[in-house]
């Protein structure tokens, strides 16, 4: 029942979107990821993200942009490296301040694909990371007229990915992409 209501609401919400106002795209970029929690002493870990998007223009200055991304997260310190891979589903509201330049804000849910702790002695451990992560994203973007775009975004984890101590994801993303 809930799925049926959600589908109907989506159809109603996007029924006014004209075909020329829908743009598909691909993007890839760099994650500078870390985890936050009490008494943690870790460094940032570099990772990649890659995926696709659809931008639904609702007006000249506002659009909705759902995305599907494969995203590498985690952290490291002198002894270990935590690697966490997700399939992330951000839904960004984009407000165009001036032609091409946008502010972006939206939620993101990520589903765990793989998690492992690599130790410096060549071993590995299972970190028992939660199967999903809920985040809030805030970013800036610039869309060039030829379809190329650049984005920067901060992803703030809202839910604990592991208990005792509670730790949460955080990452800074820089992306380049192309819309067609």
Image: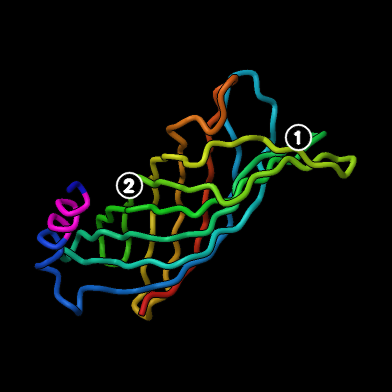
Determine whether 40 is above or below 31 in the image. above
Distance from disc 2 to disc 1, alpha carbons, whole Å, reads: 30 Å
Residue 4 located within the stretch drawn in magenta:
yes
Q: Exactly how many numbered labels are in the figure?
A: 2
Q: Quick one: 129 or 97, which is closer to the camera?
A: 129
Determine whether 8 is above or below 56 in the image. above
The residue carrying pointer 1 sits among few (fewer than 14), some (14 to 19) or many (20 or more) residues within 10 Å by Cα, namely some
Report the residue marked by disc 2.
Answer: 106
Q: Which range of residues does the magenta coloring cover?
A: 3-10
- Seen at 14% across and 51% down, the residue is 5
Badge 2 marks a residue whose secondary structure is: strand
Q: Quick one: 115 or 16, which is closer to the camera?
A: 115
Badge 1 marks a residue whose secondary structure is: loop
Does 124 sit left or right of 45 as displayed?
A: right
Residue 9 located within the stretch drawn in magenta:
yes
- Seen at 57% across and 29% down, the residue is 162
Determine whether 86 is above or below 53 in the image. above
Residue 37 is labelled as: none
- Seen at 21% across and 66% down, the residue is 57
Q: Quick one: 103 or 26, which is closer to the camera?
A: 26
Q: Position of residue 160 (x, y in %)?
A: 50, 29
The residue carrying pointer 2 sits among few (fewer than 14), some (14 to 19) or many (20 or more) residues within 10 Å by Cα, namely some
Report the residue marked by disc 1.
Answer: 77
Q: Position of residue 19 (x, y in %)?
A: 18, 78
Q: In the rendered view of the protein, which quadrant contains the C terminus?
A: bottom left
Q: Position of residue 68 (x, y in %)?
A: 42, 61
Q: Position of residue 7 (x, y in %)?
A: 18, 57
Q: Earlier in the sequence, mark 2 or mark 1?
A: 1
Magenta segment's dominant SS is helix
Q: Residue furthest front?
A: 1
């Amino acid at each position: 029942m809930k799925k049926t209501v959600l589908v109907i609401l989506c159809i109603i919400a996007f029924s006014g979107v004209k075909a020329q106002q829908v743009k598909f795209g691909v993007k890839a970029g760099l994650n500078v990821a870390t985890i936050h929690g009490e008494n943690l002493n870790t460094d940032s870990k570099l990772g990649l993200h890659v995926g696709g998007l659809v931008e639904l223009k609702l007006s000249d200055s506002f659009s909705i942009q759902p995305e599907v991304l494969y995203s590498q997260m985690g952290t490291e310190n002198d002894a270990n490296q935590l690697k966490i891979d997700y399939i992330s589903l951000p839904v960004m509201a984009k407000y165009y301040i001036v032609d091409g330049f946008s502010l972006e804000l939206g939620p993101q849910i990520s589903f765990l694909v793989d998690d492992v702790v690599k130790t410096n002695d060549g071993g590995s451990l299972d970190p028992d990371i939660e199967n999903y992560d809920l985040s809030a994203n805030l970013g800036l973007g610039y869309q060039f007229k030829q379809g190329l775009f650049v984005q920067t975004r901060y992803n703030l984890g809202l839910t604990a990915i592991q208990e005792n101590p509670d730790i949460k994801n955080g990452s800074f993303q820089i992306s380049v992409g192309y819309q067609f």
